[in-house]
Image (tube, helix red, strand yellow):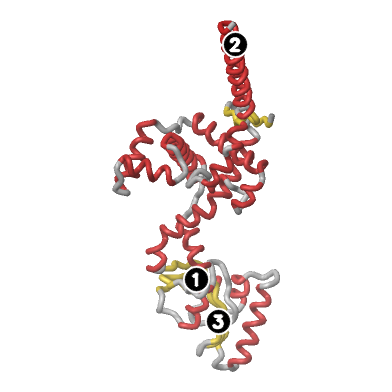
Amino acid sequence: MNFFSNLLKSFVLITLVAVGTSFNAEAKELVNRIIAIVNSEPILQSELNNFPRRLKQEGAIDDSLVLDEAPLSVLKADSQKQLDYLIREKMIQSEVKKLNLSVSDERVNSEMTTLATRNRMNKTQLNEFIKKQGYSTNEYRENLKNRLERQAFYEAEVISKLRITDEDAYNEFRQKNPSYVPSLNEYTLAQILVPSKKIGEAAAMEKAIAMKKRMSGQESFESVANAYNEGSGAAKDGVLGTFKAGEFNREIEAEIARLSEGEVSNPIQTKQGVHIVKVLNKKNSQDPQFLKIKDQIKSFLVEKNFKRQLKNWFESKKQDSYIKIL
């Protein structure tokens, strides 16, 4: 009797274990079911379920991929936006493979060693540091690998497409310093001069204003200059020549500094009379302060335009990608 009783208990126990094992396997399969496919990269339910935890881990979310979800509080509360983030992440992973930008285990090891050396940590201290960041060692290594690959992708496909010139940096410098007046190096001018000695300053100014109004209509500076120029240095089209900074009238140089090439000044009163000048060419000497921070400004402009360029990449790439939400 005891024999059969024990046998029955063993059978029930084995059955319960088997049922429990089957239940766990089904639950695991449910958690890890594929919810989306990006090219050949699957997105699992477990990845979406793990997203809130990633938000708490240091460096687990790439701010560059948080395009329209800023601030992060919006991303925390919206599972659809979390899925959108994972889709962008998978698009980059797919591109990393396509461009052969994968990072080797040796590179990851080297980065881990550099991190420990830079912070003067031994292996135990490094593991403790990783734990405080909210990772296991394997998770940290995987996250580091992904970050390195994304950085390689950004440099190859986004940053390299941003054309930030010295002129862009100089324009940014001037915008941030609205009172800045560039120092003239040299300039080429054309001029119409109405002398005031014979007719007086008021009459000369009135005559010059009338000429400037004619230029606002159908007449060019050159046609007005050729029709009327009383200056002793008058020449065809009113061309005066090229001058270095400091060689010309101070009031006129101040106006030239404000004008761009091809622009015509308003009438300028001087002791000689009233001048209307056209800047044919000018060379500005760059401010030494600008030259000191030029590279910093260019880095700022790259960062400023990075997300816009990355967003454009995603919009363009979506047309060539296979993205399926299941």
Amino acid type shown at disc 2: Phe
Q: Where is residue 200 drawn, in percent x and y?
A: 59, 94
Taking 168 as reference, is 49 left or right? Answer: right
- Of residues 94 and 62, the one drawn nearer to the viewer in this rendering: 62
Which residue in the structure is indicated by mark 1?
177
Mark 3 touching mark 1, by CB under 8 A?
A: no
> Which residue, given by chain and number where applicable, does mark 3 sit on?
275
Of callouts 3 and 2, the N-terminal one? 2
210 is higher (above) or lower (below) than 134: below
Residue at 54%, 36% (x, y): give it. 92
Q: Amino acid at mark 1?
A: Asn
Label 3 neighbour load within 10 Å: few <14, some 14-19, many 20+: many
In front: label 3 or label 2: 2
* Mark in the foreground, 1 or 2: 2
Q: Position of residue 146 (x, y in %)?
A: 47, 37
Q: Are marks 3 and 2 in contact (CB under 8 Å)?
A: no
Looking at marks 1 and 2 on the same chain, the residue that comes earlier in the sequence is marked by 2
Quarter of image, res 185: bottom left
Where is residue 154 drawn, in percent x and y? Answer: 49, 42
Q: CA distance from mark 3 to mark 1?
A: 29 Å
Q: Is residue 217 left or right of residue 4?
A: right
Give the quarter of the figure containing the C terminus: top right
Give the left or right position of residue 75, taking residue 124 as reference: right
**Is residue 265 placed above or below 26 in the rendered structure?**
below
Could you tell me which secondary element the residue under label 2 belongs to? helix
Image position, residue 309 (x, y; %): 56, 47
Question: Circle 2 is placed at which residue position?
Answer: 11
Identify which residue, 5 or 320, lies in the foreground.
Answer: 5
Gap between marks 3 and 2 measured at Cα: 111 Å
Q: Residue at x 52, y 77 (%)?
A: 255
Q: Is residue 111 left or right of residue 99?
A: left
> In the picture shown, does residue 46 fall above or below 265?
above
